[in-house]
Image (cartoon, helix red, strand yellow):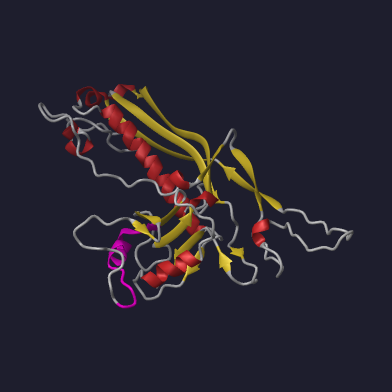
Amino acid sequence: MIPLPTSDGKSALNTSVGTQGGYLVPTEFTDKLLQTASEKSVVRPRATLIPMASRAVQVPCLDSTTVPASSDSAFLGGIVARWTEESVTFNETEPVFRQVELVAHELSGYSRVSNSLLEDSAIGLEQLLITLFGRAIAWHEDHAFLRGDGVGKPLGILNSNALISVARSAASAFALEDAATMLARLMPGWAPSSTVWAMHPTVAGELFQMTSSGSSAIYLDNARDKPAMVLFGIPVVITEKLPALNTLGDVLLLDLHHYLIGDRREVEIAFSEHVAFTSNQGAWRFVARVDGQPWLRSPITLNDGSSTLSPFVGLAAG
């Protein structure tokens, strides 16, 4: 049997070609399908979620990015207090607000499946496809939350002006000095539930071999037990969605409470048996409408007028 082409020249999933679904229809076989485990989302479980009742939503926030006077704090958003004598007129101060606009962007996919494959599959293909579609949406939105350019998609942390870049101690390295410097630039008040170290798999070896200035191993107690994926009390997540070792952002320290995700429509999965009726194929479509961006426009300048902190800290290229 020759696989039937779709209108765009691609072959639909069918039963005669193994890689296109035939492997799922054995005459007698197990009902389990071997799959590689996909990584979990980095951003969504820790971010601030905003339900969207329309295509766009305005989220008010306190503006903490203005450089403060020497006796004030940017964290207060324009409110100041002064020591005053009795009966002295107070100076008026007002908080400064701004709006963050979230605009829903569509993330979608489409797949055709032969009806014979749906009928004969030993593993429950419909549920498998639904699972795979959901995982695809989760992977691509997470990639955009981290690296999106904000054009027709979310604005990722790596492209945000709020990101602080910390100089690397040595090329192609992630040392204790780097981790300590990054933590020192993280905005205070972070919580373990929203804060995470995210790093590319090529950085993992540097983490596991991290040593002190005296060359003593400090991350692994031994090479026998499973590593505790925690650094300075903050969970560590390994993700392929970041750049490789020695590139800006191969290691990120993030307090994702300060990242906004707007959900206009969670994943919608629909099936049609009519689109490719004459080819005996069914068509699946999956769609989500979402946006995301940091709600800080820039790092926060401290009272000294020069030091800066941010909820988003990255390790610079070597």
Q: Is residue 150 visible?
A: yes
Apparent side of residue 111 relative to residue 167 in the rendered image (left or right): left
Q: Is any atom of residue 151 visible in this view?
A: no
**Above or below for 107 versus 217:** above
Instruction: Classify residue 184 as left or right of residue 92.
Output: left
Per the image, is 209 magenta? yes
Direction front: furthest residue: 86
Q: Nearer the viewer, residue 312 or 32?
A: 312
Q: Position of residue 51 (x, y in %)?
A: 55, 36
Asked where in the image residue 26 lies, by quadrant, the reply is top left
- Residue in front for this viewpoint, 206 or 31: 206
Q: Position of residue 56 (x, y in %)?
A: 60, 39
Quadrant in the picture for the C terminus: bottom left
- Number of numbered discs overlaid on the protein picture: 0
Which image quarter holds the N terminus? top left
In this rendering, is residue 99 above or below 92? Answer: above
- Closer to us: 66 or 264: 66
Identified at 34% across, 59% down, the residue is: 200
The residue positioned 22% from the left and 33% from the top of the image is 3
Q: Which residues are magenta?
A: 198-214
Picture coordinates of residue 203, whole percent (x, y): 32, 63
